Amino acid sequence: MKKTFCDLAIKIDGKVKLLIEIKAIGLELKDDYIRQAIDYGANSGIEWVILTNGMNWQIYRITFSKPIDKEMVYEINFSNINPKIENHIEPIYYLCKEALGKSLLDEYHSQKQALSKYYIGQMILTETVLDVIKRELKRLTPGVKIENDEIEEVLRSDVIKRDALEGDKAVDAKKKIQKAANTYLRNSSPAPKKENMPSAVNETETQKNLLNEEIPLN
């Protein structure tokens, strides 16, 4: 690991899937140990790193941005595990050979990311969702003039918590949502003919279809 040594490297089909840094049983997993584990992964180009003291297992995913970022996706405390409860066992399954071979850990992270406050906060502020809110408000209050920017202002100031809309994670969520929407529009719209360019109305209808489609966020 570039002049340093990680305790374990888990390989599936000849490729390192994750690194495990092991500390003494019961030892507090301090920030210095977290940085050490993350450095191992960052220096080796490995996205998934585990830090454990035997009892507690912290599962981190590294983002290779500038600067390098990390996210603790979940934590397992074996002293609290009940083998009869499915959602206690499922996080352990993601670390087994079968699950790693199927990239289920990545799927779990994508699901958690999609349901994060950052993604949902940014999704609510898209024009497509604002249009739906405006339509439903007009049904409740016929004749009242309501614009999307007014709805957005209320959402930003009074409904959505500020920390869900600020910071690097919020910016990243907004970029990914916009990228996914643009990709969907390109793939779903027919190639324009020179004599018959697509109208703004058709583009709006296509955007509304995003509400009913699964869009990859990666």
Image: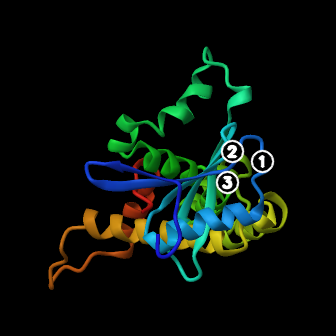
**Mark 2 Cα shell of 10 Å, populated few (<14), some (14-19), many (≥20):** some
**Tag on residue 27?**
1
Residue type, label 1:
Leu
Residue type, label 2:
Asn
Q: Which residue is mark 3?
A: 138
- Mark 2 vs 1, N-terminal side: 1
**Tag on residue 210?**
none
State whether residue 197 is above or below residue 109: below
> Outermost residue toward the right?
158
Asked whether, in this view, residue 184 is left or right of residue 114, the answer is left
- Within the image, what quadrant is residue 207 found in? bottom left
- Mark 3 vs 1, N-terminal side: 1
* 2 and 1 marks in contact (CB < 8 Å): yes
* 3 and 2 marks in contact (CB < 8 Å): no
Residue type, label 3:
Lys
Residue 90, percent from left and from top: 53, 30
**Mark 1 Cα shell of 10 Å, populated few (<14), some (14-19), many (≥20):** few
User: Looking at this view, is 105 or 24 the one in front?
Assistant: 24
Question: At x 71% / y 74%, what residue is drawn?
Answer: 167
Asked whether, in this view, residue 80 is left or right of residue 201, the answer is right
